[in-house]
Image (cartoon, rainbow, N blue to C red):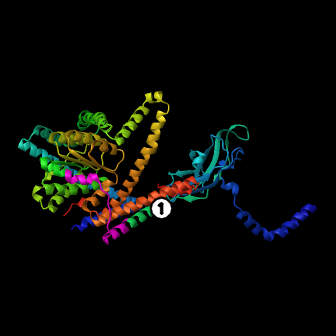
Amino acid sequence: MRTGALGHVLARRMLPAAPLIASLLLAIPPRASARAPETAVPPGPELPAPTEFAAKDRPGDTGNAILVTWKIPPALPPDARIQIRRAEPPAYDWKDIATVEPGAQRYVDSSAKDKEVYRYEIRLVSASTPDTMGIAGASGPPLVSDPVASHDNWFRLERTNSLIANILFICLILGSISAARSGKKIFIRRIAGLNAIDEAIGRATEIGKKVLYVPGIQSMDDIQTIASVAILSHVAGATARYGADLDVPNRDPLTFAAAREVVRAAYLSEGRPDLFREEMVNYITYDQFAYTAAVAARMVRERPAAIFLVGYFFAESLILAETGQSTGAIQIAGQADPTQLPFFVATCDYTLIGEELYAASAYLTREPVLLGSMRGQDIAKGIIMLLGFLGIVAASIGIPWSAEIFKTR
Amino acid sequence: MRRVPLLVTFLSGAAIASLFFIPHHKAQAVNSKLLEWTLVVYAFALILGSLSLWMSHAKKVKKRAEGWPYSMVTLVALLAIPGLGIWKGVGAGSPVGMIYDTVNAPLASSMFALLAFVIASAAFRAFRARSAEATLLLLTAIIMMIGRVSIGELISANLPGITEWLLDVPNLAAKRAIAIGVGLGAVSTALKIILGIERSYLGRS
């Protein structure tokens, strides 16, 4: 009775505060109801939870990807894995999307769609570890991420270092070109292969045989082919001056079109358009080994006095160079790819190694502007060597981020 | 008029270079479109190439030059294969597919097989110990060749390790040095082309 009376009194006194209490109760986050039914199961205590879990739009990408990251706790069983699940709020229909090694510490969900909101859940699982009931197959407590959506980006953040390096290099090259324009004398070391060009063409003229120029087998989208076509321009100028015959067989149609125009222009600029014939620059085939067979056959049948193998070559490099060697021609090769270089070094009289191929145009023309760019390259190389040395020191004394800042992705 | 190709080169070069840093789908769509245009240009260049091939061989046949019957075969093939491809298709089992499998592929394989012989003759010439450098090259080659086959491990258990060291340390160091120089040279050449400083590839005038 007393209790009933007290309850009645309390009820009467609390009545005005009822809306306030109701609001407070509503304001408390409905923790149990926000969780997926599966996550409500108490986790086994055997496995700890990962830490620093986050899900976010993968920075600097083309969209449709979410980056999930975490840190692993110490002393995990060897078969421990991270189970990753995804749900689309407000529904909590969790779907398994991946099970990965915990050590990866990151996972990219490439199945995400732009502008759709997701939540991610991760937990540690181990097939061999017993759970609280003693049954193998324990799992750790789940962690649920904040809602996240992916979107397109306008800048690839992970390439910032590459952008900075490129800007610096461009400034260096332009600065060197500007210095060269002002009349500063620039030393350039002797490149035997390029000095031998005139000698080889002179020899071909003397014995009345042709000069064979092979501009590689790649198209004009390859920088080596462009460098080769630039050298062809000088070779064609020399054959026009000396009156030697020139033969430029091509494998790529675009290279063929560019090479023909370059040779035509070289003959024009030397004042010998009468010596230029369309068939000097000719197209053979797009097939790699059919092209190789045709060029090798020309070497054997026509016995050119000078052979230039300058550009990008693959497996045909040695076949061509060795066939040319067997004919007794002076051979000058140029290649930037280290995999084919040894073949040319072994079989050719002169080889333009790596960057010498790109230096050819500046070396042959001696134009101050082009020489200036070479000086810029050399300064950049010096800076890279210095950075390499500093990197060795930094890695040796244990500065982990030193290697990271130079990584390009 | 020379400025037009230079302007086209500058605009396309700068655009493609900047697309390396822009992942947005609209920018990448521009990239794909530019690559599609390249294919169109390529197709026209292929017509030009085929015409060059036709004309050089037709001239040989007309003049009855040395080896003209081979030129005749080339001309017949140049007409017949595309004709068969248009008429019967180019898939597996089609006449073009059969010609490719039974004629082209074996001939290409034979050409590739020549590599074994030319490697032997090139190695013989390169490894003649005429100087201190050539002797060093010869010794390295001997170690490499023996260390990379099963008998090498029987001769000395250290040989495979030595070959790995040769590949991973001196060889890799030289390759990386070349790669750095090539990388800088390529960027520098590309920059010179984009800015119109290097014009040799356009022909001199």
Given the current orientation, which residue lies at the most extreme right position?
Answer: A2
Residue type (three-letter) at the residue carrying disc 1: Thr
**In the visual, does B14 lie left or right of A194?**
right
Residue at image position (68%, 41%) is A138
Q: Is residue A404 above or below residue A175?
A: above
Residue at 79% x, 70% y: name it: A17
Residue A143 position within the rendered picture, expressed as x and y whole percent measured from the top left: 65, 52
Dot 1 falls on which chain? A
Q: Bounds of the magenta span?
A: A173-199
Of helix, strand and loop, which one carries label 1?
helix
Q: Nearer the viewer, residue A275 or A149?
A: A275
Circle 1 packing at 10 Å, graded few (<14), some (14-19), many (20+), is some
Please tell me whether the stretch drawn in magenta is mainly helix, strand or loop. helix
Image quadrant containing the N terminus of chain A? bottom right
Query: Dot 1 corresponds to which residue?
Result: A160
Front residue of B129 and A141: B129
The residue that appears at 11% across and 38% down in the rendered structure is: B67
**Residue drawn at (19%, 42%) of the image:** A299
Magenta highlight on residue A388: no
Q: In the rendered image, is residue A304 in sight?
A: yes
Q: Nearer the viewer, residue B4 or A148?
A: B4
Seen in the picture, residue A8 relative to B51 is either above or below; the reply is below
> Is A174 contained in the magenta span?
yes
Res. B22 visible in picture = no
The x, y position of residue A63, in whole percent, is 48, 57
Rendered position, B1 above or below A329: below
